[in-house]
Amino acid sequence: MITSDKELPVGFMDSGLGGLSVLIEAVHEMPSEDFLYFGDSANAPYGTKPQEEIRRLTYDVVRLLLNRGIKGLAVACNTATSAAVRSLREDYPGLPIVGIEPAIKPAVERNKGGRIIVLATPMTIAQEKYRKLVERYKGGTDLVSVPCPGLMEFVEEGDLGGPDLDRYFEEHLEKYLTPDTETIVLGCTHYPFIRDRLRKYLNNGGIEIIDGSLGTARELKRRLEEKGLLRSGERKGKIIMENSDRGTKKLERGRILLERAGIIL
Ligand code: DGL
């Protein structure tokens, strides 16, 4: 049985750099906390792998984080969440664990009758968990799920705004855009980092682009608070970033992504 200690960092995992979009919100919500972020870029992408392999990779990262010592865990990856979060909660009942799922509920809640487009990895969309999520919230809305193989790679490679991204949108997204498209849900934690380019591509102030990172960060805070695990006081927490891709590039790119959000390591 895992026991959690207030002084420990909060663990974060993702298949690579994407989970940093959730970490950014968590740092803003809980500035006194320490965070240990592990990106599994050496094994990315997860989103085009079979479920069993995603689960195995996720467990490997979680074990590593637990060995280092964490008091809570954010599975900051929609793909890993759908493949493994349920069994993780069963296997580590003492540990507060939050996952992330595409923000379909808020998209439907604010829907005024136009189309909702969900962008996510092929595996997220193929999972039973996703089908149930859609079934639960979709109601009468026009909701279209668009698998995006190859999109997370732009973020991993540090291309957040080049013409290749526009070509990607043209090839994968354009055909789903209707004049009444109202909301695009970013259902993969890598995608918020290309939000600005997407907005530019859409060239339409009317389409709202949403993601679940703030909701997930708040849920994490709530869970830690509930267990009396939040740090108090004025201290400024620190962030440790690690990556299975041993080259320096991923860590450097991660540092830049945090810096763009005003978080200096
Ligand atoms: N960042 C991940 C997600 O939220 C997945 C990217 C991938 O490894 O395919 O789904």
Image: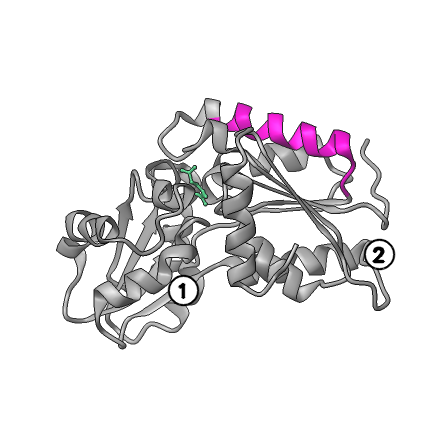
Q: Nearer the viewer, residue 32 or 139?
A: 32
Q: What residue type is labelled 1?
A: Ile
Residue at the disc numbered 1: 210
Q: Is residue 57 magenta?
A: yes
Whether residue 139 is visible here, answered yes or no, is no
For the C terminus, the image quarter is bottom right
Residue 38 image point, x, y percent:
61, 38
Residue at 43% x, 49% y: name it. 190
Above or below residue 169? Residue 248 is above
Residue at the disc numbered 2: 228
Q: Is residue 135 magenta?
A: no
Q: Nearer the viewer, residue 245 or 139?
A: 245
Residue 44 image point, x, y percent:
44, 32
Q: Nearer the viewer, residue 63 or 224?
A: 63
Q: Which of marks 1 and 2 is nearer the N terminus?
A: 1
Residue at 83% x, 59% y: name it. 231
Q: Which amino acid does label 2 sit on?
A: Gly
**Local SS, label 1:** strand
Q: In this view, does 218 lie to the left or right of 178?
A: right
Residue 97 image point, x, y percent:
66, 45
Residue at 56% x, 41% y: name it. 251
Which span is picked out in magenta?
Answer: 54-70
